Amino acid sequence: MALFNIIVFPGILFLVIAGLWFEFVDRRMYARMQHRQGPPWFQPLADFIKLLAKETIIPEDANRFLFTAMPVMALTATISAFFYIPLWSPRALFSFPGDAVVVMYLLTIPTLTFFLAGWYSTSLYSMIGAVRSLTQLFAYEIPLFMAVLAPAMLANTWSLAGIAAYYTAHPLMALLNVPAFCVAMVTLLGKLEKVPFDIPEAETEIVAGAFTEYSGRHLALFRLAVDIEVVVAGSLIVAMFLPFGLALPWYLGIIVYLLKITLVVALIAILRTIMARLRIEQMVNFCWKILAPVALAQLLLNLVVKGFLKP
Amino acid sequence: MTAEETVVKALVEKFPCFAEKIRTQRERRLWADVPADQFEAVAHHLFEQMGFTMLCSITGLDEGATFGLLYHFGQPSGMMIGLKVSIPREKPEWKTFIGLFPGSELYEREIADLYGVRFEGLPAGLRYPLPDDWPDNEFPLRKDWKAKPAVAAAAPAAEVKS
Amino acid sequence: MSKITIPIGPQHPALKEPASFKITLNGEEIYSMDMRLGYNHRGIEKACEERSFIQGLYLIERICGICSHSHSTAYIQALEELAGLQVPKRGLYIRTLIAELERIHSHLLWLGVAAHEVGFDTLLMYTWRDRELVMDHLAEIGGNRVNYAVNTMGGVRRDLTPDEIAHILKDVDTLEERTKYYAQVATEETTLVARLSKIGYLSQTDAEFLGAVGPTARACGVDRDVRRDDPYAAYGDVQFKVCVDHHGDVYGRVLVRVGELMESYSIIRQLMKNMPDGPIAVKSPRRIAAGEVYSRYEAPRGEDCHYVKSNGTDKPERVKIRAPTLANWRAVRKMIEGNYLADAPIIIAAIDPCFSCTDRAIELVRPAGAETLTWGALRQHGIDWHRKQGLDFAELNKKLNTQLGRVK
């Protein structure tokens, strides 16, 4: 049963399908908001298959091992993070006290693989993209951590399953975390490298950033990893900030869960429709001067509330 | 007195040498041939004293024994004067204008490439517009230049799958 | 961090046409830039000298896809002045109308490209959709989306029907509405304004001395517009305001172009209202009297100058073209220094560069061998190639001629 859970549902196969599906949802919404037709539903899958069939080119100067290992690393890290997140019930597939922190770290790994992949491609565009990935990581990671840990603090547990259980018992407490939710949504755009924070892969400046030298299978895996990262990071946000409907029967729970992920994807699509790409220094300024103080204030608020609740 | 007459009068007063050489073609269009040794003085006067602060372009001309360089100066009011200077074909050398008007750099590089006129004082830089491996002593806009197979062979052979 | 040099071009996603920029970076900051142009050099100036005046017109129209009418008008004005032709009023009005339609589609296109360069694709999609309205009208009038071929010696080749006039007026209203919205987006959307203002700054003195033209210069406070200063076609009959801005940065260039769009709509309405009746062209001679003419034209990108010299035969002695982009390159080098790499594409795009325009003037080179094709051989090559693909135009021509009752 555990093996079935890992490989088929809600494990790897489900994640791949969901990743491709939500890429379609995102692209379609983006297109419709721009008065375009948008791709058909099977387009992400078709892209994936096409890339698998294409020739894979590895630059001569690149580090072969790291170059080929990085896409797999990115994919593995995102998939492993998924197993610790409660999806439609207060229980996750695996759980232990402190898994919230582990999931956050696992979700940092893809960004690091982008950096390493770009750096070891030895192309100028890749290297600039890689450095930008890392610079951006330092900017959004702290506000994101603070924002995600705020609900955990209120629930008095570092376990995602524990947090879900707490908010199922006290649903109104989730409303306190709205500022942290906003911060998390914005930093999520940075983590997923979407407009306005798609600076590391800014097409018009550095071609495709860290992915410039990638092609064929490796690029397909990287793209799949990014797609899955959307679902996993979305699930994390949903588990932390929208812990509603977890007590429902499983079939209703799944529908509610998918709707919540759609909401997160829709928010991402809307935000990237209405904004232009920022410059890296504007992005860092914004994260440290606005997002970090808001996240800090949220932590403070939660501490005070906690003090009142437990005399 | 029309604006054109004013300009002509002012110019002739300062440089009596081309009293008859200024031609008024129509409203806002003047043409003048300038002796090579006078060009600098005239151009500076036009540029600094008479408000012809735009160098719209420089046209190169192949006139047989000489090359003509036609400087199109303009006033913001729309008045244009074409100052033509002739330089010998055997010794096509001329002075750069970038000291006064830096914007003329590309116009001069173009004439240097297409007519083979050397501009003294033009700093070394990337050529424009011919390719880097263009053969020496081939100046396409000279009248005696015709496309020859030799030139075609010298151009880089791009890989084309037949 | 040490200095690194990053190449942008000849092939790069930020560039729509080939050109090579070598940007030396100090971290993310641009230390200096060098550029290599000329990739699109096609020898048009030389080719014009070997063709008749009217054949040259078709070559000149193909210098650039966006401002094809600009170049052909500048050239044909020079010829008409040389030949002493008086173009009928209606011809001039139609010429001006096409010019303004072209300015609208060019500026809308630029607005989209500029938005794309800073990662704001939504505006790109919006403006390019609206641009289609203008493209449709140009196609309706000239029969073609890009090379309208409206100009001819002594006037224009296509007349307007009252229906077409009504259509154009209706769409101009729509476009005006949309442009107001884009102006609002461009000036109020925070991230867009953050990306556009205070980058690529050029002072008014620099703009003048580096020879900047068009919206690039006008955004630095240089009050110049050939349409007003040296009126041609029907611009003497219409009222319009020259848009000048004092920001001097990319944001200012956006404001100037959006302002010019609004002025173009007003010019089109005036032209339509006062459109005189009468012929659209006069008969023109084959040979043109000897002489030289300097023709200026305010293209969407700035002043476009053509110099034509005739020696009294049916071929020009010299045709010189100074496209607006060529005049602006020197200014780009100045305004890019000290900015961030991230801003390089938008600063380059801010002059609305047109590499094809810049590079004109050598011959067709067959890559594999050392063979130069003559005009006739090239034509035969084309016919043979199509025949090999199963397309025989000789048969089709015969069929067409029979249908039209023109049997040889």
Image (cartoon, rainbow, N blue to C red):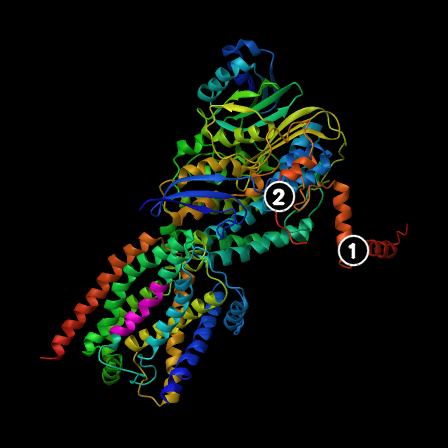
When the figure is inspected, residue C192 is found, relative to residue A169, above or below; the finding is above
In the image, residue A105 lies in the stretch drawn in magenta: yes
In the image, residue A279 lies in the stretch drawn in magenta: no
> x and y percent of residue B147 in the render?
69, 34
* Quarter of image, res C295: top right
Majority SS type along the magenta span: helix
Say which chain tag 2 marks. Answer: C
Residue at the extreme top: B16
Tell me which segment is drawn in magenta. A101-113
Query: Which residue is found at the position 62% from the left and 45% from the top?
Result: B157
> x and y percent of residue C369 in the render?
68, 44
* Quarter of image, res A157: bottom left
Query: Which residue is found at the position 75% from the left and 33% from the top?
Result: C284
Say which chain tag 1 marks. Answer: C
> x and y percent of residue A130 in the render?
37, 57
Mark 1: secondary structure? helix
- The residue singled out by tag 1 in the image is C387
When the figure is inspected, residue B119 is found, relative to residue C164, above or below; the finding is above
The answer to whether residue C174 is seen in the rendering is no
Residue at the extreme left: A311
> x and y percent of residue C40 in the render?
58, 42
Circle nearer the N terminus (2, 1): 2
Left or right placement of residue A229 versus residue A214 in this view: left
- The residue singled out by tag 2 in the image is C68
Which amino acid type is shown beneath numbered disc 2?
Ser
Mark 2: secondary structure? helix
Query: Which residue is found at the position 23% from the left and 65% from the top?
Result: A295
Which amino acid type is shown beneath numbered disc 1?
Arg
* Quarter of image, res C377: top right
Q: Are marks 2 and 1 on the same chain?
A: yes
At label 2, counting other C-alpha atoms closer than 10 Å, the crowd grade (few under 14, some 14-19, many 20 or more) is many
Q: Is residue A42 or residue A310 the one in the foreground? A: A42
